[in-house]
Image (cartoon, helix red, strand yellow):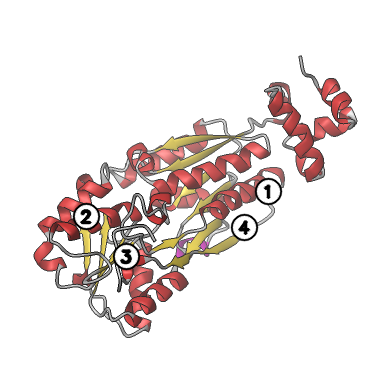
Amino acid sequence: MLSIKEISKQTGFSTATVSRALDPRYSGKVKASTRQRIMALCDEYQFRPKFSAQALASGKTYTVGLISEDLESMINSPTFSQFVSFLAQELKNNNYTLSVLPVSDHDPETIDKEILHTFYSCRMDGFVLSSNTVGTLTLKELASGKFPVVTYQMPSDICNPMPVTSVRIDNRNAYRELLRHLKETGRRRFVIIGMGNSNNSRHEQCRKCASELNLAIQDSDVLLLPKEEVRAEPTLGTYLAVLKHWEKLKQYDAWIMSNDLMARGACAALRHFRYEPGREIAVTGYDNMEESRLYLFQKPMLTTIRPPLNLLGTTCAQLLLEQIRAPGAGSKEIKLHSELVIRQSSHQTNYKEEAP
């Protein structure tokens, strides 16, 4: 049976070094290459150190809670699942476990109370919090600085007045490049097709960029589909919605979709009306899903915006661990940037049915 002494013997490192490498409180003080060798051996033998005694002594549980929107939304969001994967991996690299804590998405006041209950009742060392779940009561608790918390995708006008560490993806440059690309390829009539409420920050960023380029996107040029019709099956739901709103949507020559799954549904609907995506009407997405760049699954391949989900997950984890290990270190605001990926769905001149 593998033990710290056995790990020390097999790797050549002292038992003190092995103990520090396996202890989340001190693993950051061990050279990365040293820790990697030790952890590789632990993985080979499926050895996991027992931190229960350490937890009792230090008051730590080595568990982080991710508080986000309802479970159904999380399951059906490729973007969210990728973010969680990178977040969990970085925490695991530091001997922390991630616990996902979904809240209901019905009544904002109820959500606020759920989060406060989670803060005080769950024995966790810190929390990662989605902007979608933040209400008035939660903001007051965040401002108090009682809990190690990192928020992601929270608007800067909410974060800046408070001592809250936040990580945001800034899509403005990517949307500016997208709109410029569409304009250069002759598109002039733009519609944003999304889901849910009208407070989508990405939609607002897109509209501001359009204004900078003298491309008007009015309120009437934003079509928000009901969540209950799209959330469970984004591709099919969008396909049916486009059929329903065809008379309005066919007037636009550029459809800016909220995500890649919705864009796939839009492309399917265009073919229903014998339009080829990228010719008469450009279709763009957001996420850069694997299927969007594989010709086998998506014809034509989808022009989209690629958010830095790996950096979002790892950065949230690293910043939260900093707070846990050094309380009172001060808040930070980190801004990450997405990028435009141009493919066939926004501009086709010689479309062929065989793979390029």
Compare residues 255 and 151 and report the one nearer the observer: 255
User: Dividing the image into 4 quarters, which one contains the C terminus?
Assistant: bottom left
Name the residue beneath numbered marker 1.
322
Residue 164 lies, with reference to residue 50, above or below; the image says: below
Name the residue beneath numbered marker 4.
331
Amino acid type shown at disc 4: Ser
Q: Which range of residues does the magenta coloring cover? A: 157-161
Q: Is residue 159 magenta?
A: yes
Q: CA distance from mark 4 to mark 1?
A: 10 Å
**SS of the residue at dot 3?**
helix
**SS of the residue at dot 2?**
helix
**Callout 1 environment at 10 Å: few (<14), some (14 to 19), or many (20+)?**
some
Name the residue beneath numbered marker 2.
268
Residue 327 lies, with reference to residue 272, above or below; the image says: above
Q: Is residue 93 left or right of residue 340?
A: right
Compare residues 87 and 120 and report the one nearer the observer: 87
Amino acid type shown at disc 1: Glu
Q: CA distance from mark 3 to mark 1?
A: 43 Å
**SS of the residue at dot 4?**
loop
Name the residue beneath numbered marker 3.
345
**Callout 3 environment at 10 Å: few (<14), some (14 to 19), or many (20+)?**
many
